[in-house]
Amino acid sequence: MYDFAYHKPASIADAVALLAGDPEARPLAGGQTLIPVLKQRLNKPSKLIDLSGLGLNRISVSGNALSIGAMTPHATVANSADVQRAIPALAKLAGGIGDNQVRNRGTIGGSLANNDPAACYPAAVLGLGATVVTNKRRIAADDFFQGMFTTALEPGEIITEVVFPLPVEKAAYMKFAQPASRFALVGVFVAKGPAGVRVAVTGAGQNGVFRQREMEAALTARFAPDAIANIKTPPDQLNSDIHGSAEYRSHLITVMAKRAVAAAA
Amino acid sequence: MGFEGIGAAVKRKEDARFLAGRGNYVDDINRPGQVYAYIKRSDRPHARLKGIDTRKAAAAPGVLAVYTGADLAADGVGGLPCGWQIHNKDGSPMAEPPHPVLAVGKVRHVGDPVAVVIAETKQQAKDAAELLEIDYEDLPGVAASTDAIKPGAPLVHDDVPGNICYDWHIGDKAAVDAAFARAKHVVKLELTNNRLVPNAMEPRAAIGECDVTGNYTLYTTSQNPHVIRLLMGAFVLHIPEHQLRVIAPDVGGGFGSKIYHYAEEAIVTWAAGKLRRPVKWTAERSESFISDAQGRDHVTTAEMALDEQGNFLALRVSTLANMGAYLSTFATSIPTYLYATLLAGVYKTPAIYAEVKAVFTNTVPVDAYRGAGRPEAAYLLERLVDVIAHDLGFDRIELRRKNFIPPDAFPYQTPVALQYDSGNYQVTLEKALQAADFAGFEERRRQARARGKLRGIGVSTYLEACGIAPSAVAGALGARAGLYEVANVRVNPTGDVTVFTGAHSHGQGHETTFAQVVAERLGISIAQVDVVHGDTGRIPFGMGTYGSRSLAVGGSAIVKALDKIIAKGKRIAAHLLEASVDDIEFKDGKFTVAGTDKSKTFAEIALTAYVPHNYPIEELEPGLEETAFYDPKNFTFPGGCHVCEVEIDIETGTPKVVNFVAVDDIGRVINPMIVEGQVHGGVAQGIGQALLEHAVYDSQGQLLSGSYMDYVMPRADNLPSIHVGTESTLCTHNPLGVKGVGEVGAIGSPPAVINAIVDALRDYGVRHIDMPATAEKIWSIIQAHQPRMAAE
């Protein structure tokens, strides 16, 4: 990797100030994407602003919301009794990301800010109608994800926490893993809760995570696997690569959605 | 001490250091004054190299030198040699285009080394390499062997027409044609053997060093340091062998990929001589993907002629073998003498004819990878037998039994050069079928179907030839090296033993297995035996480890040396015990006068040899150290039966191996635990090839699966618990009766897996599926045949 300066601010204000003064500075969360990219010399930041000193590793449940701090590692989410009680599907999803090392370093905020089109968390955040809270504002999940590796975040804006509305009546995530990376070739998060019935698909879309609204309508009418068995997602909007054609991904969306509904019901 | 000799499952001695993280690998070694090489590689598959401006890079901080192909050529550095010459059908020699250490004129594959930057730190070398200005003129590339032979295809080497390295054949074509003409049935199968990336856990690394007197040392990740010394010293750098020491210390896996002499070894050694500083290079994993010789990559048409009863009459095979851009050290021998000679397999097919075209493409060179030619042959045969059974309605087990070489037919001369010394294929088949509960399978299939799964079972009855190789035979077939092995057994004055072996351990456990052989023979404990390998400065000139040869050839050399030790010990004992040497018996570590209680221990004899006060000095030299070279009389022929059971998720096509049984006849077993580990590893790689692994290139030669994000290595959750059984029909021609176990797992398993997949899909009208059998491929087959299922 190229040389860079390293900063570990103790407050969000300091972090924002460091980022604001330098367009080449990059925030560092768990580093599970950024560090490999740096090692391959594909990115040349002037400085890395380590967000691990900002007190953002926390989980709390209030009456109608589960809040997860942006710097909470996947393993913490997976093993949290609060998360397991409030939204067990979310804990399970977190426990299925990457491997042990990734789960103990990677964070929910880092994953969302990166918005990898095959990442798992975006499906949960969109599927549960969560709100992404930053140092500046609250962004609805529907507005947050704006295409592959693209989000509503503005330069210098830092995610502080993610708020999931409760109670979640039913939810499940089903992932068909890409066999090498174990990212989602297709992942479908299905939920019924305060945000209504939602079906969020990751791994498949050319623009990253998306809602399968035809399935949502069918499941709103009747929450059962066979209600969506014949709903196909048009392949022309889906990814195609050496691990799966768009047609295969389209097929897997239906299969994974059915399985998620069955698991959630 | 408990029993530690031949047959004891003792724990591995070397694991004490490996499990504690105390192995000593090349990258762990740092020499005083060491500098670092970074190799700038081509990022394009095929381009004319119009110029390289090195000035900015050379001026960068910390840079000692920047070298290109022109610098090496100016210094008289030779190209990388190919160790095996194949001849065309017409008797002319193969095309053998130059393989420059650093590219000259053209780059021919992604990863082709173009320049080397040497700097005080690795970081500086890498920074400077970004300042190299390389003027490429892109040329159209070609990656698939089937495309490379088309008229008008881009020429990888301008002077190799049609990209054909050789067009070779073996067998009696006329007899095969005649048999086909009178055959009742002919069954044809077209199949590919997918290209694999070897992925040793330890990436390659090398350190070159040159001392004030001009003596060179190369530390390298090699399976055969003497071969590297010979090839690099004699052909590339012209360094006299006595001034070149090659050290291959602990090596973390090879699977064939560390047999070859690679450009980086020559680069660091040569540069160390120029700069008089030790020069170190360590591959990054992404470099391994584009610079380690890859494996397999065959496209084959096979046809079997049969009579009405299903007897095999003749086999006709035509194979395109992808060599990649250059000839790696033993590349040419793999699809010929390690492949086509195996096409009889375990069957008494009376006539066989095979032709192999080896083809240059704009891809990473291809060479031996665990099994090397034999997996390709076994896969072809064992798929073909299942397809014959499918097409003609034979029972696939009965068809095999009917065509097996019977146990009383050994030694058995095949129509493709090899003579098998021993084997009993019926026994391994029966044992494997029993262990796999083959008879109860249909009930398991029914139960799986009720759970929404398609269950299938597949069998392969494979054979391989290893214990490579009788030198005279190899030489007659084009090998440019001998293939014996050597051992020096040094008994120390206090009676412990150091064995210097030409074999090299890079995961095989030689330090334990060889010690067990010595312990058994000398009646000492394995703790008293030290096995030294991997250093041309310490060991005699040996040929190294590949082709499952270490025990069959290297172990035999140790036994021969031990025989000499014991013979000399008897003479010393006869003197001390005042008896005739003919009356001395050696057993359980004691030299005894037959029929008496007069004896001397092995340690007493050793001490006497080195303190020869009371010694027959007129007729016997002092000391107790013997060297033996062993040239095998024949290959060894392990064989056996693998049974695989799979379940397929109908909705997604995902296959899962749910049971795997391997019953291998590997001759005498020295350490059953190590044998089991070898089979586990081989089967894991075989399942990897069958279901997961694939080096995917685009049509021009860009590697699309060039990292672990896209290249699918098998992991624990892809593998079942593997049942390993062994059978010991002894090899008849080596002193231990051993055959070799390093490769059987990777050879026998891929066809068993694919046969199981095809069996699971039997209701879907499929007769063959190419490796890797991915979920999407299987799903496509299921999709295509949905109507037929719906109609049922």
Image (cartoon, coloured by chain):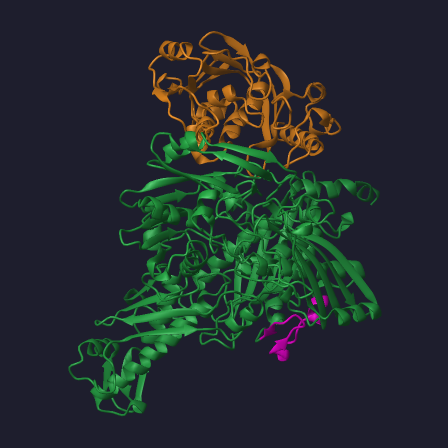
Chain colours: A orange, B green
Q: Which residue occupies the extreme front position in the image?
A: B74
User: Quadrant of the rendered structure where residue A123 is?
Assistant: top right
Rendered-image quadrant of the C terminus of chain B: top right
In the picture, measured across the screen, residue A90 lies left or right of residue B315, that is left
- Spot occupied by residue B605 in the image (x, y as percentages of width and height): 23, 79
| The residue positioned farthest toward the left in the image shown | B613
Pinpoint residue B460: horizontal percent, then vertical percent. Answer: 64, 61
Asked if residue B503 can be seen in this view, the reply is yes
Residue B239: image quadrant is bottom left
Please determine whether, in this image, residue B13 is positioned above or below residue B777: below
Q: Nearer the viewer, residue B618 or B93?
A: B93
Residue A146 lies left or right of residue A246; in this view the side is left
Q: Is residue B34 magenta?
A: no
Q: Quadrant of residue B388?
A: bottom right
Residue extent of the magenta highlight: B399-420
Question: Quick one: quadrant of the N terminus of chain B?
Answer: bottom left
Give the vertical position of B724 relative to A220 (above or below).
below
Looking at the picture, how far across and down is residue B739, in whole percent? 51, 69
Asked if residue A104 can be seen in this view, the reply is: no
Q: Is residue A171 left or right of residue B355?
A: left
Q: Residue at point 31% right, 50% down?
A: B210
Give the camera-side residue of B750 and B446.
B750
Magenta span includes B406: yes
**Total count of labels:** 0
**Residue at x-position 56% and y-position 56%:** B331
Counting from the top left corner in percent of width and height, residue A6 is at: 35, 21
